Image (cartoon, rainbow, N blue to C red):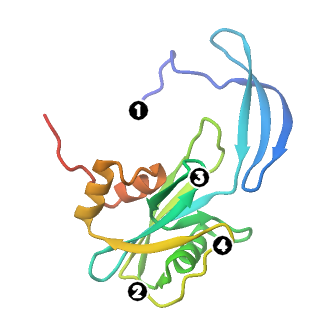
Amino acid sequence: MNNRASDPKPWKLIKQESGPSLKVFASRFEYRLNPRNGKELKCLILDSKDWVNVVALTPAKETVLVKQFRFGSASVTIEIPGGVIDPGESHAEAAKRELREETGFSGGNWTYLGASEPNPAILNNLCHHWLAEDVVLNHTVSPDEGEDITVITASLEEIKEAVSSGQMRHALAIAGLAKVFDLRTSVER
């Protein structure tokens, strides 16, 4: 993709101030100058550690998924396993740990799929996506204090139906799955 003279330019940082400290995020406000109109805008930034998620496939080619309550949507979601990278931990180590803790599955062959920006409008972190093939159930589940998880497995067709019907809507889970599978159920041309 080529840059053009009319492309948006970075906004000049005028000042920053701390916001409230939150459990998972630190918040701050930045005052930036819009280069298009010269107006100052106060922006909320949530500072976060990077995250990981894992598309984990069993030897039978079933995908390991988790169901859990999410506070933001006040609903139970269907997702791929994942979480926050701990201090001093690589994203590869975090992916293996999160899969083991949340699902009890481990082992297999691991491939890094790249990273996504969860929401660059307000977040400054990345979500690293991993593929784990031929994982097996070796451990008991050990969720974090703030988690209550049910582990399920699903075929590709079941995942496509869940995405198509809106039963699975978690954007980062869908982004990870889309790096492995074609999730389209039909395409009209």
Label 3 crowding class (10 Å Cα cut-off): few <14, some 14-19, many 20+?
some
Q: Nearer the viewer, mark 1 or mark 2?
A: 2
Label 1, secondary structure: give it: loop
Residue placed under numbered mark 2 in the picture? 136
Name the amino acid type tagged 2: Val
Q: In the displayed structure, would residue 134 be above or below residue 47?
A: below
Q: Residue furthest top?
A: 37
State the residue at coordinates (37%, 59%): 177
What's under tag 3, amino acid-wise? Leu
Spatial separation of the CA atoms under disc 4 and disc 2: 21 Å
- Please name the residue that numbered disc 4 is placed on: 144
Residue 45 placement (x, y as % from top left): 72, 38
Which quadrant of the figure has residue 2? top left
| Quadrant where the image shows the N terminus | top left
Are the residues at dot 1 and dot 2 in contact (C-beta closer than 8 Å)?
Answer: no
Would you name the residue on which mark 3 appears?
126
Answer with the quarter of the image where residue 180 lies. bottom left
Q: Earlier in the sequence, mark 4 or mark 2?
A: 2
**Mark whose residue sits in front, 4 or 3:** 4
